[in-house]
Image (cartoon, grey):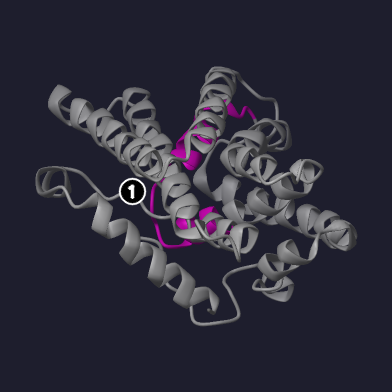
Amino acid sequence: MKHNQVVQYYAELMKEHLQQKYLDEKLQKTPIEDHKLYYLYCLTKGNQEQDTYIVSTMLVQMALNTHDFVYKDFKTEEKHSVKNQQLTVLAGDYYSGIFYHLLARKGEISFIQQLAQGIHQLTKAKMDVFETNYASLTDFLLAYQSIDSALLTTVTHYFDETTLDQIIEKWILLQTLEKERLKIDEGKDSVFQRLVLELVNDVKSIQQLRYQLADQMERLIIQVKEEQGQCPEWMLQWIEVYDFDRHIQGPKTDFVEEG
């Protein structure tokens, strides 16, 4: 399947597991991170339980991202009802519960344990990153890139690929920065933007962040091009979907937007 077909297929598959009318009516939808989804597709291609691994991992990722919304809201001066905060936590827990049920039903106990270990390590790392002040965006991104890709590296280790952590971190960060740049251009808020404005000393405005993101992406593009030769064949399939010349603004095939 092509990139857009993969994203559409798994978006529909996840939708079947996520239908909860009350939460859907009260809360904004947590977008599916298509670049992470397609990474998992390439990693698990040919595995009999591919759908189970991809859906369960992406449910965990959505749960973690949903809980981040609570952090973002508590750190602002905006007034949010206690009920809304509780519902957001509930939604994250709901996604986690589905992932446990899905894997337990398939007897994938070892994969549950692997993800649980990754969640524990990621939560501890997030606490450190979210409560630290950084002199520059570069310093912040060095810390942030490990939590952005933590779940994917955990899953990658499960499939006996244990030497790719740094490459994965850089590729995921590069794609995350491109998505954040597009959000700024479209006037959309995000947890990432609020974290940077609060924690990074030399970024005082969204405009400054937009300018610095472009510089960071140029730096990362140079690095990942140099390291591309170290990637296994399945990873090259993931990488080749994206266009360096467009700063990875989207895949070469028709793109399905997040959400």
User: Residue 146: which quarter of the image?
Assistant: top right
Secondary-structure class at tag 1: loop
Q: Is residue 198 above or below residue 16?
A: above
Q: Is residue 54 magenta?
A: no
Q: Position of residue 183 (x, y in %)?
A: 46, 57
Q: Position of residue 216 (x, y in %)?
A: 72, 50
In the picture, measured across the screen, residue 109 lies left or right of residue 80, that is right
The amino acid at mark 1 is: Thr
Q: Is residue 120 above or below residue 18?
A: above
The residue that appears at 60% across and 64% down in the rendered structure is 45
Q: Position of residue 137 (x, y in %)?
A: 67, 37
Q: Is residue 100 above or below residue 32?
A: above
Front residue of this view, candidates 158 and 48: 48
In the picture, measured across the screen, residue 78 lies left or right of residue 240, that is left
How many labels were placed on the picture?
Answer: 1
Q: Quadrant of the C terminus?
A: bottom left
Is any part of residue 245 visible from this angle? Answer: yes
The residue that appears at 40% across and 42% down in the rendered structure is 103
Q: Is residue 189 magenta?
A: yes
Name the dominant secondary structure of the magenta segment.
Answer: helix
**Label 1: which residue?**
30
Q: Residue furthest front?
A: 107
In the picture, measured across the screen, residue 161 lies left or right of residue 124, that is right
Q: Residues within 10 Å of mark 1 (few under 14, many from 20)?
A: some
The residue that appears at 55% across and 36% down in the rendered structure is 204
Is any part of residue 257 visible from this angle? Answer: no
Front residue of this view, candidates 120 and 211: 120
Q: Position of residue 57 (x, y in %)?
A: 47, 45
Range drawn in magenta: 178-201
